């Protein structure tokens, strides 16, 4: 059993305990949008639910998961010596306080602004303060990660940082930059109005600040998954990683390119010029590079494992892979979902194609496919990998775990594929209740019903996931568990350039890129006539 | 393990030196940015210029976000078509929210003859003012004063008030109870959607998508609030119905961007009557 196991375990448990209600709300939302009879067909209930679902799924669950996974990685990289444990616990409790505040505002119906805030909508200040505390809690984690990153380098002079520690530190640095947008939007734009100090808000400026967060946050969710691709899967498959250097390059490309691209979320917004939208679209295409590198490296790693296990011929190695290993199965399924998900993303970031899918269900389906499909399925596998090490008890049933992953895979496909099609048929997003007596809308009814079936499959999968976790936690202790072992490369590099062993240079590059890509689009708001409009308060209380 | 995949014994790679890799990175990134800017700010504007009637300079300005639309594209509004002179900016909202109810109570002595002793009117075609949001009252007085909402007696009264006095009297009436109920937050319940059986409740909560009608409640409440929009719960039925007719006929047109003229213009007389009844009875019907 590993030392300092309580810290990652508490984070992972908290992450999944918030994940559970968020999944249930999601399934209900899919149901209420369908033609099926339902209780509580109240749009206000729907928007409160969407806010809770989005806040938990976008901010709370992946953040807690990355924090827990990060602590586990740092702890094993440093052989059970984790610096900054007190800081880590402060961060954890700050985050939980934030969740409690935000939840109280959402469930009293005072913060149905959806997790992306949508100014000029204004909800209760408790919601925004709660979300800010969640982010501030995660800043403690960033500090602890970077502290351990540097402590490792100090303890091991002249050696290259292990890929897992390097990647999670890049993730922490990325998250710091990412949160600056949403945090400044909340602190300087929304909270003053929500607290009643001001009455008007510059929606253009607020949306631009949020766009800084909105895209990079996806890569923050994705990096723990990619870490598992590179460092856990090859080991679990009984092979080696194809290339260590490729991994380092991919994580650095994510750090550099996921931030100066957020304007592609504002293609239809009038406050920015077409030139800057084009520049950021080009930079967005650059983010495809690390994903392509990863797909290549990981497929190669799978092939290496398959051939080491005796696979022959062009595709014979595929059969030889250990498909009963949750990690191998999850990574393969995740890669399969990453394909269509990534393709949808390329549609969204293409300036003119974006116009066709703008504000349709296509977009919602896209981010559910990417997040649910490519990302979360690997979170499950990481949990299966870490649980025995953190609890000292063996995993209850790998078979149930594999069933769970298959159900999740099909559930996500059955939810999102019809959802994409409904979007292409013109179904708008953010609609609580659709009028199926209208023939135009009725065409999409079978698709929405299919999505409901998918949502129920997902729900079933999550129940299985909890059964495995709880049964594993209650099992007899298995004595000494081997520590988590991260995969080595087939040909571990003998030397690693300092550029691929540190983050300083890349942070400077990122800052320069941000100034070039965002300097003018943000600066213009301070130069032009005030464009503020009244905050659209959800409650009459503000203007009483 | 096969021969070709044999792993070197040393698994701890050492760090090397920074050679000119950093320079290569900077050059590649600069090239990407240079091409992106050149295409976005020169090539595309030039292409647009060939196709359209705008100048290259205008197209580059457009790429920068300076939208140079000729002012003649916007026909100057005539005084008759201006719906209201109230602009909801920081100053106006601040003024509307900071009336003195004690001063307002004195001014309100002029109002009681028609609007009732405590702002609750017993004459069904005259609105009750007790509990009406102060921002609403402030705006209506401003519109009466500027002539964008028409009423003989109210125009005369509003002309005698300064904006500050309007805010004062608005603060007074909004503080009274027994009239309009403001209920922005309420527990979620069933039957508040297109699935509602009662057609009037359906109109209130879900509108009618086929006519492009938004639900009344999405601005007026219950369950929602919009700046400058009154709550209607407990308002006098005849007054509501008469105002819907006025909006529909274009007699009343002080709604900025025409939401009420559009919606009321699509309602039938029976629907107007039913909506007025439901809102006037308040909570028991409009749960």
Image (spheres, coloured by chain):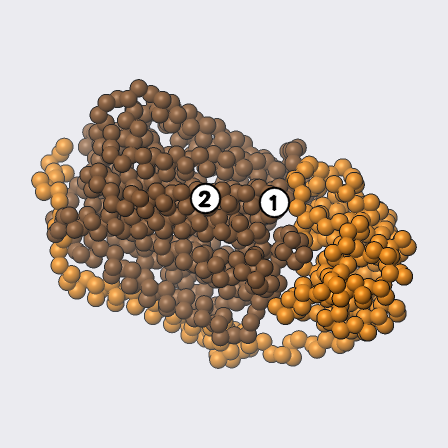
Chain colours: A brown, B orange
Q: Hey, which quadrant is residue B230 in on the image?
A: bottom right
Residue A437, image x, y percentages: 70, 41
| Residue located beneath label 2 in the image | A97
Q: Quickly name the residue at label 1.
A: A109
Name the front one of labels 2 and 1. 2
Q: Residue furthest left?
A: B9
Please state the chain letter of the residue tagged with numbered disc 2 in the rendered image.
Answer: A
Q: Residue at x 30, y 28 (%)?
A: A391
Residue A39 falls left or right of residue A269: right
A363 in relation to A322, above or below = below
Q: Position of residue B160 (x, y in %)?
A: 82, 74
Residue at 75% x, 63% y is B102
At numbered mark 2, what does the secondary structure look like: helix, strand or loop?
helix
Q: Where's the N terminus of chain B, which quadrant?
A: top left
User: Taking the image as drawn, is residue A471 in sight?
Assistant: yes
Tell me where residue A438 sits by quadrant: top right
Q: Residue at x 60, y 48 (%)?
A: A110
Relative to B162, residue A82 above or below: above
Quadrant location of the C terminus of chain B in the rendered image: top right
Mark 2 and mark 1 lie on one chain; the one further toward the N terminus is 2
Vertical position of residue A277 compared to residue A2: above or below: below
Residue A244: mark in rendering: none
Q: Secondary structure at mark 1?
A: loop
Instruction: Mark 2: give few (<14), some (14-19) or many (20+) Cα within 10 Å.
Output: some
């Amino acid at each position: 059993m590993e030392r300092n196991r309580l810290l990652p375990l508490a984070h992972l448990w908290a992450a999944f305990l918030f994940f559970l209600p968020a999944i249930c709300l999601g399934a209900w939302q899919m149901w209420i949008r369908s033609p099926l009879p339902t209780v509580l067909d109240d749009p206000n209930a729907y928007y409160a639910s969407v806010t809770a679902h989005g806040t938990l799924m976008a901010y709370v669950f992946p953040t807690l998961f990355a924090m827990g996974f990060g602590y586990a990685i740092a702890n094993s990289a440093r052989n059970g010596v984790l610096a900054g444990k007190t800081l880590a616990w402060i961060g954890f409790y700050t985050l939980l306080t934030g969740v409690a505040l935000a939840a109280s505002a959402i469930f009293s119906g005072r913060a149905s602004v959806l997790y992306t805030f949508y100014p000029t909508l204004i909800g209760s200040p408790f919601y925004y303060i709660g979300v800010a505390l969640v982010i501030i809690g995660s800043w403690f984690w960033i500090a602890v990660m970077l502290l351990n990153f540097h402590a490792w380098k100090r303890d091991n002079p002249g050696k290259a940082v292990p890929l897992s520690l390097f990647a999670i530190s890049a993730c922490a640095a990325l998250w710091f930059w990412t949160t600056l947008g949403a945090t400044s939007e909340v602190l300087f734009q929304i909270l003053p109005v929500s607290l009643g100090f001001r009455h008007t808000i510059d929606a253009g400026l607020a949306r631009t600040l949020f766009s800084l967060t909105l895209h990079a946050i996806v890569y923050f969710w994705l990096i723990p998954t990619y870490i598992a691709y590179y460092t856990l899967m090859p080991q679990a498959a009984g092979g080696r990683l194809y290339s260590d250097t490729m991994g380092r390059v991919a994580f650095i490309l994510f750090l550099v390119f996921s931030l100066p691209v957020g304007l592609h979320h504002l293609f239809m917004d009038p406050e920015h010029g077409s030139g800057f939208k084009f520049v950021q679209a080009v930079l967005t295409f650059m983010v495809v590079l690390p994903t392509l590198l990863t797909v290549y490296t990981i497929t190669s790693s799978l092939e290496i494992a398959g051939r080491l296990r005796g696979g022959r011929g062009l595709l014979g190695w595929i059969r030889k892979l250990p498909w009963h290993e949750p990690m191998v199965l999850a990574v393969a399924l995740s890669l399969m979902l990453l394909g269509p998900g990534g393709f949808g993303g390329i549609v969204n970031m293409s300036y003119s194609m974006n116009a066709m899918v703008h504000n349709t269900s296509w977009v919602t389906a896209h981010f559910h496919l990417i997040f649910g499909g490519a990302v979360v399925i690997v979170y499950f596998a990481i949990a299966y990998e870490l649980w025995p090490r953190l609890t000292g008890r063996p995993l209850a049933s790998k078979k149930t775990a594999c069933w769970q992953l298959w159900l999740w895979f099909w559930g996500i496909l059955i939810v999102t594929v019809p959802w994409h099609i409904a979007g292409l048929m013109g179904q708008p997003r953010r609609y609580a209740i659709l009028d199926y007596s209208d023939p135009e809308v009725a065409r999409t009814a079978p698709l929405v019903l299919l999505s409901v079936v998918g949502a129920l499959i997902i729900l079933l999968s999550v129940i299985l996931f909890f059964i495995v976790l709880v049964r594993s936690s209650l099992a007899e202790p298995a004595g000494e568990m081997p520590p988590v072992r991260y995969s080595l490369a087939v040909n571990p590099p003998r030397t690693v350039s300092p550029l691929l062993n540190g983050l300083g240079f890349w942070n400077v590059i990122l800052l320069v890129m941000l100034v070039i890509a965002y300097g003018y689009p943000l600066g213009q708001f301070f130069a032009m006539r005030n464009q503020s409009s009244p905050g659209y308060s959800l409650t009459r209380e503000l203007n009483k | 393990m096969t021969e070709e995949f044999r792993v070197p014994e040393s698994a701890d790679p050492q760090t090397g030196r920074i050679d000119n890799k950093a320079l290569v990175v900077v050059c590649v990134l600069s090239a990407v940015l240079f091409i992106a800017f050149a295409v976005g700010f020169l090539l595309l504007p030039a292409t647009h210029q060939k196709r359209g009637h705008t100048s290259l300079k205008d197209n580059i300005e457009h790429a920068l976000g300076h939208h140079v639309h000729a002012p003649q594209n916007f026909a100057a509004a005539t005084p008759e078509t201006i719906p209201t002179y109230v602009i909801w900016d920081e100053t106006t909202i601040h003024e509307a929210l900071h009336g003195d109810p004690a001063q307002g109570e004195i001014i309100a002595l002029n109002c009681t003859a028609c609007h009732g002793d405590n702002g609750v009117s017993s004459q069904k075609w005259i609105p009750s003012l007790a509990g009406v949001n102060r921002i609403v009252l402030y705006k209506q007085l401003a519109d009466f004063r500027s002539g964008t909402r028409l009423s003989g007696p109210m125009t005369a009264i509003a002309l005698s008030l300064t904006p500050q006095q309007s805010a004062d009297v608005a603060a007074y009436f909004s503080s009274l109870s027994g009239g309009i109920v403001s209920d922005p937050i309420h527990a979620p319940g069933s039957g508040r959607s297109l699935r509602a059986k009662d057609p009037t409740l359906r109109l209130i909560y879900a509108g009618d998508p086929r006519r492009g009608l938004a639900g009344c409640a999405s601005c007026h409440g219950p369950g929602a609030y919009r700046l400058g929009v009154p709550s209607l719960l407990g308002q006098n039925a005849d007054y509501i119905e008469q105002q819907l007719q006025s909006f529909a006929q274009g007699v009343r047109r002080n709604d900025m961007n025409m939401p009420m003229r559009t919606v009321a213009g699509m309602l039938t007389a029976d629907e107007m009557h039913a909506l007025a009844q439901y809102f006037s009875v308040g909570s028991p019907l409009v749960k």
